[in-house]
Image: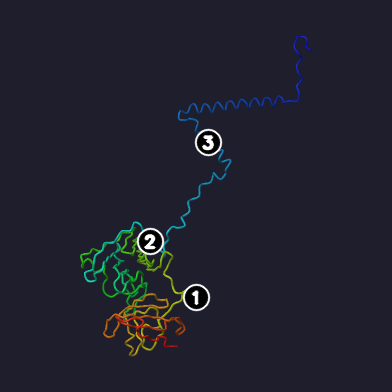
Amino acid sequence: MTNQNGYPPPQQAGPGLTTTAKVLLAGLAVLAVLALVSVIAVIVTDPESDGSSTAAVTTTVEATTQNPAAEKAPEPDAQPADSPTPPVAGAFPGAGGARPAGAEPLPTYVGRYSGLESAHLLTPTGNIGCDFQTADDKGSQGLCGIVSFNTPSSPLGCVQRHRDCKGKWVFPFENDRVSQPTDSSGTTGWMNQPANDGYAVPVVEYGKQYYFKDWVIASELNGLTVWNTATGSGVFLSREKAERFDGPGGADPAPENGSGTAEAIVLGSAADNSRGFGTAQPSEIHSGGSGSSTYAYDLTWQDWGSDRATATGLGYSPVDGVPVTVVAFEPGQCGGQRAYTKVAYYGEGESFESASTLNVCWER
């Protein structure tokens, strides 16, 4: 059907958008076009832009939206579980273990009297020094000492020498192990050089490591660490303290009483006019009275706390100053405390098996 003008009649409007909605949609379309034009204008007017920045922003936003954890900073790397640690406080990390790769050999010489290859060292302050040598027939390999500890008020204690108490300040080396601290009469090897054999004592620089045979030395500003790579036995020396250790695992182990706690042990029990008995690691022993055969002095002990402890020193039989060996054994209870109950005392050319023994627990 057509109207009077010959055109089809207009269609009836169904339910659709209102006039207001149509206006809003038109406005949004205009805004979208304007925004697109602005982005194109920015890209075109920036001569450095190749569009990659826009893509990077889009990628970052998408990654952040999909993975909120991407906003967190990465966790710091954990310290490796096998990092070396000091065996005792202050010591060189890894001491008691293998020789560090960068360690330098100490200069050596052959002693004119001993005929043994030897070496010495001093710290930059001169307060700590060491002697090293190949083992002699008694297993002695040298020592290290702290000069400022050479006083009766030594932090390591003192040794009663007749009427005087001599400060403990040196740690002897024997059979690849560091012995208990003791005093020292006379001078050390590093004190005698370079007067003998034309050897100049080297000064070990801080932050460097050195070695002589199986002995390693680490020089640090806070102290000197020395250890034997064959046994792990070592010592940390400083102006404030000195502490032995036994391998990378920690401090020198103490004997235990079965409950996991350390228990001291002494040599027998004290008797009338005796010396050293009833004490731990005595540097001098005398049974009193006429027992001159049990008189020994300048004793240095090994393996104290084990089933058998051995000391070397000097005695009066048959003349004063002869080398002697004292063996303490058969631990037990004596005078209410743990003690070695027997002692063997013998001179050069003799042995523990052939020596006569003495019961030194007089109270039981």
Q: Quadrant of residue 287?
A: bottom left
Say whether disc 3 or disc 2 marks the residue closer to the N-terminus: 3
Between discs 1 and 3, the one toward the N terminus: 3
Residue farthest to the bottom, as pictured: 290
Q: Quadrant of residue 308?
A: bottom left
Q: Residues within 10 Å of mark 1 (few under 14, many from 20)?
A: few
The structure residue drawn at horizontal position 45% and vertical position 30%, both measured from the top left corner, is 48
Q: In the drawing, what numbered circle is on residue 285?
A: none
Q: Residue at x 32, y 86 (%)?
A: 293
- 363 or 206: which is nearer to us? 363
Helix, strand or loop at label 1? It is: loop
Name the residue tied to disc 1: 258
Residue ID for mark 2: 98
> Spatial distance from mark 1 to mark 2, Cα to Cα?
32 Å
Q: Is residue 190 left or right of residue 304?
A: left
Q: Return the residue at label 3.
A: 57
Q: Amino acid at mark 2?
A: Ala
Residue 162 seen in the current view: no
